[in-house]
Amino acid sequence: MRRLLPGKINPVLIAFLIPLVVILAAVVFMVVRNHVHNSLETFDLAAYNSSAADLRGNEYNLDAQIDSQLQWNEGFGRLLAVKLVNGGGRLTIFVPESVANDVRVGQRYHIKVIIKDTCPEAEEMDKY
């Protein structure tokens, strides 16, 4: 019968703990990320259309479907027309290439936008 010495760690215990720690870290990351994303206000198209200047610098959540690509500049980004999923209408947003470089018409995204001088700019995009 083999006994564990007080100074040694059982390899089976290590093999069990490593995946457990990785899974726990992934769950914590997802919860924190969703909490930050959900803590933002939902984008209000009517308020934006009535006074976009008053919303400059604010961040919002936006659920949208890609309607069309209006323009693309390599190394810079895309100008997209999106349909708001909640039936709120159509909106033009800028998507920097660093945020998403493979966007297709018809795809749906949860988008974190910041209101800039010219149009809303995507900061994060998660396809759903």
Image: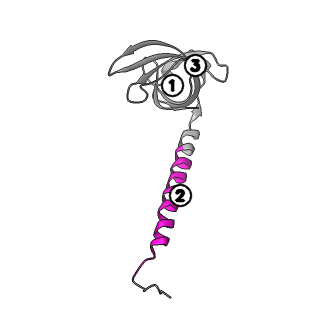
Q: Is residue 110 left or right of residue 124?
A: right
Q: Residues within 10 Å of mark 2 (few under 14, many from 20)?
A: few
Where on the picture, by quarter, is residue 94?
top left
Camera-nearest residue between 115 and 71: 71
Q: Are marks 3 and 2 in contact (CB under 8 Å)?
A: no
Q: Earlier in the sequence, mark 3 or mark 1?
A: 1
Residue 23 within the magenta-colored segment of the rendering: yes
Q: Residue at x 42, y 20 (%)?
A: 117
Q: Which mark is residue 106?
A: 3
Where on the picture, by quarter, is residue 63?
top right
**Residue 104: x, y in percent?**
50, 20
Camera-nearest residue between 103 and 12: 12
Residue bearing the label numbered 2: 24
At mark 1, the secondary structure is helix
Camera-nearest residue between 39 and 82: 82
The magenta span reads 8-33
Q: Earlier in the sequence, mark 2 or mark 1?
A: 2
Give the foreground label among 2 and 1: 2
At mark 2, the secondary structure is helix
Which amino acid, mark 1? Leu
Which amino acid, mark 2? Leu
Residue bearing the label numbered 1: 55
Give the foreground label among 3 and 1: 3
Which amino acid, mark 3? Gly
Q: Residue at x 54, y 47 (%)?
A: 30
Residue 83 within the magenta-colored segment of the rendering: no
**Residue 78: x, y in percent?**
42, 18
